[in-house]
Amino acid sequence: MTTKFSILKVIAIFILTTTIAAESLAQAPKPTANKSQESIAAAIKGLSTDWSTAMLKGDASILERIWATDFIYVEPNGKRFNKAEGIAGMKNSTEKLTSAVAGSIDVRVYGGGTVAVDIGDYKEIGTDKDGKPFERLSRFTNVWVLKEGKWQCVSGHASSVPVK
């Protein structure tokens, strides 16, 4: 009888444990986790907008704030530049932008909310040094890291997309 009772006890504990585990796994993600990811996505989208504003206005202070010290970017032509080179290039540009917009941005969050990747489109319209109009469209991927409480871009890449 003791063996039979022990087997029934084990089966009852197994069923109870399995039921509790199934209930735990079936629960929806915690709203705070979703809210945190949503707030991170909103922050990253805002920084991408700031980046576009910097390019439009030629405002290096924005890039100084949002690009990390070890920032590296790869342009559609394959050329790489670091933070100092990118800011100098913007300051020395002879192009005049009339529009610079980042849009269709998707953000993914990793590392417990300390790393984010955004993928989106960037369109700029303006004139070159000779006054010739241009319109460029690119698709970008940027990697953002939360450093000392601030989101900073550490790496990025853009690919040209034909303008329709």
Image: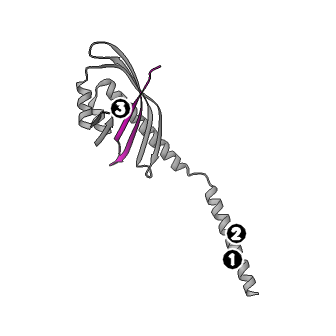
Q: Amino acid at mark 1?
A: Val
Magenta residues span: 138-164
Return the residue found at the far front.
78
Residue 100 visible in the current orientation: yes
Sequence-wise, the earlier of marks 2 and 3 is: 2
- The secondary structure type at the circle numbered 3 is helix
| Separation of residues labelled 2 and 1 (CA atoms) | 9 Å
Tag 1 residue: 10
Neighbourhood count class around disc 2 (C-alpha, 10 Å): few under 14, some 14–19, many 20 upward: few
Sequence-wise, the earlier of marks 2 and 1 is: 1
Q: Amino acid at mark 3?
A: Trp
Provide residue 116's location: percent of width, then percent of height: 42, 44
- The secondary structure type at the circle numbered 1 is helix
Return the residue found at the far bottom.
1
Residue 51, numbered circle = 3
Q: Amino acid at mark 2?
A: Ile
Residue 38, numbered circle = none
Q: Is residue 56 above or below residue 18?
A: above
Q: Is residue 100 above or below residue 132?
A: below
Provide residue 88's location: percent of width, then percent of height: 23, 30
As rendered, which of 153 and 85 lies closer to the eye? Answer: 85
Residue 81 sits in quarter: top left
Sequence-wise, the earlier of marks 3 and 1 is: 1
| Number of numbered markers | 3
State left or right for residue 107 relative to residue 130: right
Tag 2 residue: 15
